[in-house]
Amino acid sequence: MIRTLTIAFAAAALLAAPAQAKYEALHSFCTTADCKDGAQPWGLPATDGAGHWYGMTQTGGLADDGTVYELSYNGTRWLSKRIHSFCAGACRDGSTPRGSLVVDMSGALYGMTSTGGAGNQGTIFKMTPDGSGGWAFATL
């Protein structure tokens, strides 16, 4: 069902696109295993309505077990910033994120990982802006 909807939306976008449409990459993720900003993005990015886009990578980061990233436009170009790096293996906050992030009305991010947490079976997490440009991470 999801694949059918994705294909339908993609087909509708292509049919509605002008003949001279210009497409550009906003950010290219690293292709090596030790990418500190993340690699292999997973899921759809989510927006907070203020022009920031958030997403997850399944590898890369400080422990090569995935990241949460933010894309923002500074008036000239798109900037990518890692806002969380997941730990390696069966750690408390989880690792190898999957799915897409959800942004609530207050700007908090919600997501899930496929491994880590109790029993190493994955986690559901929440990230809240801390008011100083950083983020507070909590496993739900």
Image (spheres, grey):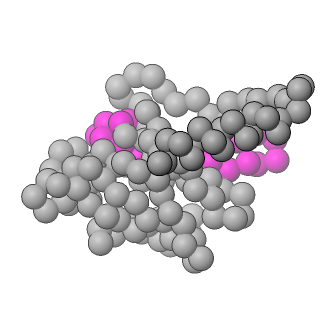
* Residue at (62% x, 48% y) in the render: 71
Image quadrant holding the C terminus, namely bottom left
Report the number of discs: 0
In the image, the segment drawn in magenta is: 59-79
Dividing the picture into quarters, in which one does residue 64 lie? Answer: top left
Residue 97 left/right relative to 100: left
* Residue at (35% x, 25% y) in the render: 33
* Residue at (44% x, 42% y) in the render: 42
- Above or below, 93 against 25 in this view is below
Judge whether residue 128 is colored magenta: no
Residue 58: % across, % down: 37, 40
Which residue is more in the foreground, 113 or 75?
113
Identity of the residue furthest to the left in this view: 119
- Above or below, 91 against 132 in this view is above
Identity of the residue furthest to the top in this view: 32
Residue 11: % across, % down: 69, 36
- Above or below, 108 against 78 in this view is below
Residue 71 left/right relative to 97: right
